Amino acid sequence: MKIGIFCGSFNPVHNMHLALANNLIKQNYVDKIIFVPAGGDYKFKSNIIPFKYRYEMLQIVCNKYPNILVSDIEGNGKSLFTINVLNKFKKQYMQDEIVFICGADNLSYIDKWHNGYDILKNFKIIVIERDGNKKKDLLTKYHDYKNNITFANIKKNNISSTYIRENINNKDITKYIDKDILKYIKDNKLYERR
């Protein structure tokens, strides 16, 4: 079985994340996907809400899909390096193949990550194209690892968690986010401007 590991802040999880996961499964890139929300000290994003809320929102939507799960591997408050996350899943699912899912924007600087070349060398990577990152350029840059890199044929979508956070209180965002997630956000008063 191929298990896709989808890391991110998921601040909050939205319909594009779910569509992406479902399409990767439907198109047989992977058999199962595990969402891995970043720990509470994730330094690459500002305004990130506590792990507990992001994890619970993912639980709500993942419970609706049999092949999509959420992990609390970073739930102790500390963000792990991606290579450590992937290696932990590799040990946990020894009979399966662990596949890393990332955007082309992330792939463009994976060589700068902690042990980024170990990810390129030891794991298959499914890449979601984003505007401004050219497939040909990336395959040239990582020529030695091109057999481990697959660009998924999935339609781009410009929904962003930032847009949702900025407009949740003044615009109709119901087409961008699961109704149960929206209710959870309102009930817990998340993303309210102080």
Image (spheres, rainbow, N blue to C red):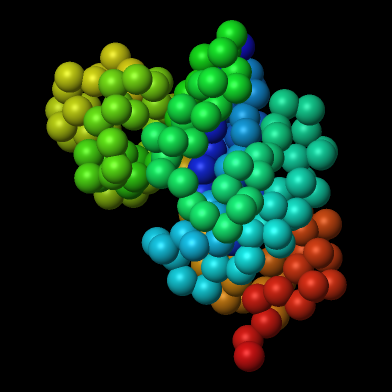
Residue 177 horizontal/vertical position (percent)? 70, 57
Residue found at x 49% / y 52%: 79
Residue found at x 71% / y 61%: 53
Q: Is 100 left or right of 175, judged from the image as shown? A: left
Q: Nearer the viewer, residue 118 or 11?
A: 118
Residue 171 horizontal/vertical position (percent)? 67, 76
User: The C terminus lies in which quarter of the figure?
Assistant: bottom right
Residue found at x 82% / y 38%: 64
Q: For residue 102, which quarter of the picture?
A: top left
Q: Is residue 97 above or below residue 171?
A: above
Q: Nearer the viewer, residue 187 or 49?
A: 49
Residue 109 horizontal/vertical position (percent)? 25, 45
Residue 119 visible in the current orientation: yes
Residue found at x 70% / y 35%: 69
Q: For residue 63, which quarter of the picture?
A: top right
Total labels: the figure holds: 0
Q: Is 162 left or right of 180, judged from the image as shown? A: left
Residue 28 visible in the current orientation: no
User: The N terminus lies in which quarter of the figure?
Assistant: top right
Q: Is residue 181 above or below residue 118?
A: below
